[in-house]
Amino acid sequence: MTDRPLAGYRIIILEDDYYQAHDSKDTLVEAGAQVIAVTATVPDIDVHLAAGRVDAVLIDINLGRGLSFDFARVLRRNAIPFLFLTGYDAGMLPEDLAGSPYISKPADRARIVAGLADLMASQS
Amino acid sequence: MAIYATKGDKERMADNPYDPFETLFGAAFDASPAAACILEPIYSDDGGVADWRYLAANRRIGDLLGLRDPVGQTLRGRWPNASADWMDEFAEVLTTGKPLTVVRAASESGQIYETSLTPLRFGGGKAVMATIRDVTGEHRARAEQREADARYKLLFDTIDEGFCIVEVLFDEAGHGHDYRFLEANDAFVGQTGMVNPIGKTMRELEPDIEDKWAETYGRIALTGVAERFESESPAMNRWFDVFAFPIGETAPFQVGILFEDIAQRKLMEAALRHSENRLHTLIEASSDLIFRMNPQATLMEQVGGDALLGDVGEESNWIERFVVESDRAMVGSVIADASARRAPFHVENRVRTDDGVVRWLSSRAVPVLDDEGAVTEWFGMATDITARRNAEQQLAHGAQMLRVASEIGKVAMWDWNVETGELIWSDEHFRIEGYEVGEVIPTYEIWAERVHPDDREGCDTKVAQAMASGGDYINEYRICQRGGEVRWVSARGRFLYDEKGQPIRMLGAMIDITQRRREEEWQRLLVAELQHRVRNLIGMVRSVARLSAPSHRNVDDYVDHLIGRLQAMGRTQSTLTRSPGRSVDLAELVREELVVHAVQPEMCHVDGPEVALSPHAAEIVTLAIHELATNSVKYGALGDSGYIRIVWSTYEKDAKLWVSLRWQETAPRGPTRNNRKGFGRRLIEERVPYELEGTGELKVHDTGVLAQLDFPLQDTGSILDPRS
C-alpha cells in the first residue's frame, strides 16, 4: 500500500452527520482521493455522472434506511461500487444487499481507506 | 220270512186268490210279532212292473199301518201318495233277488219305519215280502245321542285344556306300561306338541316318556279312583296340571285325562320367587336406606338397606331429628306438596346423622294408595350423595375457574373429534379467528382457511407430527382475519388416543400473541438502534475531539473545551432520554443552557413563540448555545457587564415552517477579534446547513457577537427516526 492508496479515485460520501462526514472527507483526501461530493441527503447520481466519473460511494446506512438502501440499489444498477459504513449490524441489510462490502462504526481511518482500496482493487 | 207253498196250496190259491190260506204257515205269518205283508208285481203291457198287489198282510201290520184286509188291493191303490216312493226299491228287489232294508219316515204320520224287503219265489211266480218295524223311538234316541256326542266333542274342542281318553296297556306284572290314545281334543296338540295321537301309544309318540305317567294311569284304570296332580315331564320339557278319571263300567277302565301345560306358569312362579328373593337381598344389601313413612310423611321407619342415618328402627320424626336446620323449610314444603298431590317426591338435602356427621341425601318416595285413593303409607329410599355433591361442587368450581381464567386470560380453546371431524371452539377461539361467536360451524378446513397462506403448510405438518408422535403440538402462526388483519397466535395442543393407539381427540389452547410479537420486533429494533446510536456517538465524539484539537495550544484548554462540548451533548441526550421520541421545547433548552453557564436573568432577554424542536435540531441548537455562551463568558458580553438577547420567531418558506433564532450580544467593550474557523463557527455556519438544511451565520461586530440560525422544523418523528 502506498501513502495515497486512493489517488485519482472520484468518491462520493453519503453521511448525514456533519462531523463524521468531515472526518471521512479528510481521511479520503489524505489518502489521495478526490471527494466529489459530501452530502447528508441522497444525491442524484445522474447529475454526478454527467459531471464525470464516480469510482465509489461511501454510504452511511441512515436517513431512513430505505433511502440509503434504495440508493445502494441505484448504484448497483449503475455498476458503481459502494461501501457501507454504519453503526448497525450486518444483519440489518436487506436480503438483496446482504453480502455488500461493509464496515462497522466506529472505524478508524485506516480501515475506511483499506475498505475502499479493496473495493477499487476488486473492480479493476 | 219265506213262505213255502205246496203244489196244492198254489192251486187253491189260484182258485181263490183272496182267501187267506188256512195253513200252518199262514197262521204263523199272521201271528208274527213283526208287521209283514207280501205283494206280487202287476206287469204292464210292455213287461214292466206297473203296480204291486197285496197277497197277504198279517195282523201286526194292520195295527201298525192301519192296513186292514189289503189283500187284492194294489200298492198304488192303497197308498196313492207314498207308493211312488217305493216302486224303485220293490223293482230292485224283484230284479236282483236280494233283500233290501230301507229306513224312511212316513210321509203322512212322520213315523220312522224300518222296512225290509225280501224277495219270495213260489211256484213260477215272484213276490216281495215287506216286514215293517217302527223305529221312530230308536231313531230319536240315536239322534239325541249323536247330538250330545257332538256337543261334548265341541265342548272338548273349545276348552283350552287338553283332553284325551286313553286305554292303559299293562305289562306282564300288571303295571301300567304304556297307554293308547282313543280320543283327543283340538287343544291336545297345543298342550302336548304331539300331532295325530289317535290310535298311537304314548311311547310311540315320545319314546323317552317317564314311567310315572303310565303307572299313574294304570293305577286309575285298575282302582277306578280319579286323581289330580301337577307333574313335570322333562322328556316333553313341560309341566302339567292333570285331572285323570276312570271311564267305563268295570276295571280296567279307560282313563279320561284333562290336563294343562303349566310350564309358563311354573316359570313365572319361579321367576317371581327368584325376583322376590333378589329384591329382598337387594333391600338388605342396598347401600341406600329403604324406608316407609306414615301417610303424612312425617314419621319414618327404616325397613332395609344401609343405616345411613343411624338407628331408625322405630317411627321417628325424621325432619326434626335429621334434616339440618337450614334445609328443613325446603324439605317440609316438598313433602307438603307431594302429600297434597299424592304424588312421588324427590328431595336432596343435608342431614346430620346420629353420629353428628353431615351428609347429603337424595330421597325418593312414592305413596301407597288404598282403593279410595287415600295414602296409606309412603315407601322410598335415600341415597348418600355426599361424594357426588362434593364432586359436583368441585367440578362446577373447576369449570368456573376454567371459564373465568380463559376469559380473563383470553385463552381460546378447541376440542377436535378426529373421528367425526367435529370441532368445538370456545368463544375466544371464534373471536381470535375473527368470527362472531357461533357464526360458523368450526371444522378443520374452516380453521385452515384462516391460517396465513405462508404458515399453512407448517401448521398442517405440525398437526400431523403431533398426531403421529403423541407429543405436544406447539405452534406459532399467523391468522388472517376477514378484514385482512393479521394476528399472531401461540397454540399448544395434545392428541388423545384410544386403546388401539388411534387418535380420537385433540384438545388445545391458543392465545393471541400479536402484541408480544410486536413488542419483540420493537425490542429487536430498539437494540439495533441503540447499538447504532452508541457507535455513532463514539464516532461523533472522536470527530469532535479531533475538531477541537487545532484551536488550543495547551492541553488544559483543550480538555476544558472538550469536556464542555461533551457535557452539552450529554445534556441533549438526557433531555431526549427523559422524553424519548418527543420534541424538545426551544425556550426550555435555551434557559437550561444559560443556567449551566451561570448567566444571570438580568443579563439576558429570552423571548420567542413556543417551538418544538426535533431531537436532532435540539442537539445542534444546544451545542450552538453552549459554544456561544462559552465564548461570551470568555471573550464577550457575559464576561463583562454586557447584555444578551436571545429571540426567535417562526415563518413559512417553501411550504415548511422555519424557525429563526438570533443571539445578539451587547458588550460595553469591543469583543476580542476571533475570526478563526473555530468549533462554534463551524457548527453554526457548516453543520446547520449540512444537517438541518438551513443557514447559519456568526458575526463579530464592535458591539458584540451576532449569531443567527435559520432552519426548517422537521416532524418530531419517533425514537426510531434515523437522526432522532
Image: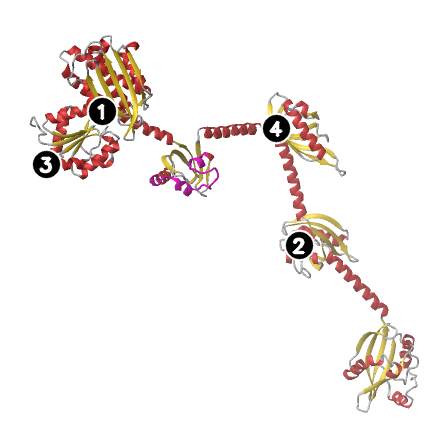
Name the chain under label 3: A
Q: Secondary structure at mark 2?
A: helix
* A65 displayed left or right of B24: left
Residue B331 or B127: which is nearer the viewer?
Answer: B331
Q: Which residues are magenta?
A: B428-457
* Label 1 – label 3 distance at C-alpha: 41 Å
* Label 3 – label 2 distance at C-alpha: 123 Å
Please name the residue that numbered disc 3 is placed on: A124
Q: Please, what is the three-letter code of the amino acid marked with disc 1?
A: Thr
**Residue that sits furthest to the top in the current view:** B641
Compare marks 4 and 1 and give the one earlier in the sequence.
4
The image position of residue B62, as x and y in percent, is: 91, 77
Please name the residue that numbered disc 1 is placed on: B695
Among the 4 quarters of the image, the one containing residue B475: top left
Among the 4 quarters of the image, the one containing residue B328: top right
In the rendered image of this protein, does residue A3 appear above or below residue B137? above
Please name the residue that numbered disc 2 is placed on: B192
Is any part of residue B381 visible from this angle? yes
The image position of residue B715, as x and y in percent, is: 31, 27
Would you call the spot at circle 1 few (<14 residues within 10 Å), some (14-19), or many (20 or more)? some
Name the chain under label 4: B
Q: Secondary structure at mark 1?
A: strand
Q: Please, what is the three-letter code of the amino acid marked with disc 4?
A: Leu
Please name the residue that numbered disc 4 is placed on: B361
